DNA sequence: ACCTACCCTGACAGTTTCCGACAGGATCAC
DNA sequence: GTGATCCTGTCGGAAACTGTCAGGGTAGGT
């Protein structure tokens, strides 16, 4: 665990030294070469630390990843637990696991008595109808939306006609009892809703639409809310 | 950084699973052999984690307040935000406010970049049908359940016949498109589901049923899950 | 006392990751 | 433009890690 220890020492060193601090100085402090120090910085960044590196100046620790414990009211704990319970029943296995982990992380920060309250939340969620498990490409769609990259898909419409599309995925929603991707459709040159189970051959492209996801999603949602009838499906 | 990530996942997994948990189970969860799992445990111990290993039983993680809470992954942030968004649309004004506050508290602890991710979560929730606002006595019912105190109510059943009841409220669920209270009914001497909108004159009593709420709720849930047809309404 | 179910550790060959040295490009402040 | 630094790729060698196998020990239940 020597490297993990060293990474912790590195971040402590950055907190301690006057900033900006050079790679050479940090390397000396942690006992590694400069090249290794660059790697260590990359690792810390990958773990969530916000470190700014200005050529000619040095490094600045912008955001410290240490999290203080939270104080939640009992009702807030109920809300969190209820929400996470809903997510766990959503049919999306990855998201369900994440909900479970998030719940555990929150619970771990709570005093013991509040932990018990969280575990035995009064408000519960049950579903007697089983949700269809999410298709395997949901994770890829989510990743594409995060990274604001276009997807190439084959889409089977209501008449079972298949078309190849390039889409800009904006959001994934559970709507009309099924999972849908809200996206910009290159074929139709307009916003469209795509049923996930009608999508096939989902391929991540290199085409980036950063930073347009959020404004486009806003516009699509505005249209969804403004219209009394649903907009056309894909 | 694959191993360091795995060690973090291991400790998260220990927090999540019921304890004691066997090395075999943890190895399966983290995708390594048992021998590697033993090594991982040794590494965590070397780093200060308090883990008790009882031969024939399994491992117990003794939570140390010095162990920092883990950072949320992006998917965990998505799960939290989606869950809280669902709660905000639930029709329960107090709970919605609490969800909002909880979300704000969590968001406030996140690094700025992750804050933006939380605000613009890919997975969203929408409801076009409006939920009936929760009746005013929902808060009172919740409080009674928390404090494990009986409630006196007037209940209007399906035939519009009104009966006075003393109930032990165990849980509140959204089921069959409406809010229901799962409770022990003094009149029927059995578990019953009560529609919140059919309840009136809800009065908190001084009769305590502590500490029976959790085992009773467990029993009621066991019955709910075991029966193919729904149990009788109140 | 016996049995079951597990924790625990050492050794080994093969695999994977990490390291420092070197090279070269990019950026920022003055 | 210059000086100081961040940044990233490549390479051979070192270090760490892995799973398999073997064998010993312990707690709880009967």
Image (cartoon, coloured by chain):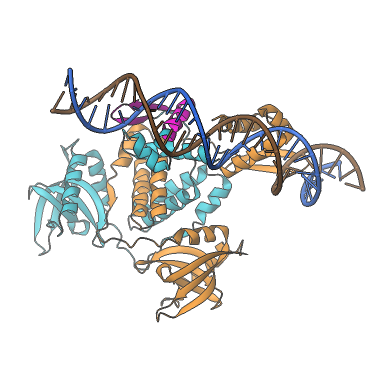
Chain colours: A orange, B cyan, C blue, D brown
In the image, residue A214 above or below residue A31: below
Instruction: Identify the residue shown where x is 63% and y is 42%.
Output: A42
The front one of A86 and B91 is A86
**x and y percentages locating residue B59 in the rendered image:** 35, 31
Report the side of B234 relative to B11 (left or right): left
The front one of D20 and A219 is D20
- Does residue B77 appear in this view? yes
Report the side of A42 relative to A79 (left or right): right
Instruction: Identify the residue shown where x is 42% and y is 43%.
Output: B31
Q: Quadrant of residue C21?
A: top right
The front one of B129 and B221 is B221
Q: Is residue B42 magenta?
A: yes
Q: Quadrant of residue B230?
A: bottom left
Residue range corresponding to the magenta coloring: B36-61
Q: Residue furthest left?
A: B188
- Report the label total: 0
**x and y percentages locating residue D27 in the rendered image:** 27, 23
In the image, residue B79 above or below residue A188: above
- Does residue A22 appear in this view? no
Instruction: Identify the residue shown where x is 48% and y is 40%.
Output: B6
**x and y percentages locating residue B44 in the rendered image:** 46, 30
Q: Is residue B50 magenta?
A: yes
**x and y percentages locating residue A57 in the rendered image:** 76, 39
Name the image quarter holding the N terminus of chain A. top right
Q: Quadrant of residue A205?
A: bottom right
Report the side of B36 relative to B180 (left or right): right
């Amino acid at each position: 665990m020597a490297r993990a220890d060293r990474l912790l020492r590195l971040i402590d060193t950055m907190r301690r030294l006057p900033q900006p601090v050079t790679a050479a100085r940090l390397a000396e402090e942690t006992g590694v070469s400069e090249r290794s120090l660059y790697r260590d910085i990359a690792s810390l960044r990958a773990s969530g630390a916000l470190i700014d590196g200005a050529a000619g100046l040095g490094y600045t620790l912008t955001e410290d990843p240490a999290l203080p414990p939270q104080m939640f009211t009992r009702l807030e704990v109920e809300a969190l637990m209820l929400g996470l319970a809903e997510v766990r029943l959503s049919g999306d296995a990855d998201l369900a696991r994440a909900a479970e982990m998030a719940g555990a992380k929150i619970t771990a920060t709570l005093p013991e008595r509040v932990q018990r309250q969280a575990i035995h939340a009064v408000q519960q969620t049950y579903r007697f109808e089983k949700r269809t498990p999410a298709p395997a490409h949901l994770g890829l769609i989510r990743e594409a939306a995060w990274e604001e990259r276009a997807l190439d898909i084959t889409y089977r419409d209501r008449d079972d006609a298949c078309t190849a599309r390039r889409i800009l995925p904006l959001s994934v929603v559970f709507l009309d009892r099924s999972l849908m991707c809200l996206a910009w459709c290159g074929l139709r040159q307009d916003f469209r809703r795509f049923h996930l189970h009608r999508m096939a051959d989902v391929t991540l492209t290199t085409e980036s639409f950063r930073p347009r996801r959020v404004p486009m999603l806003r516009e699509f949602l505005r249209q969804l809310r403004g219209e009394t009838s649903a907009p056309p499906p894909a």
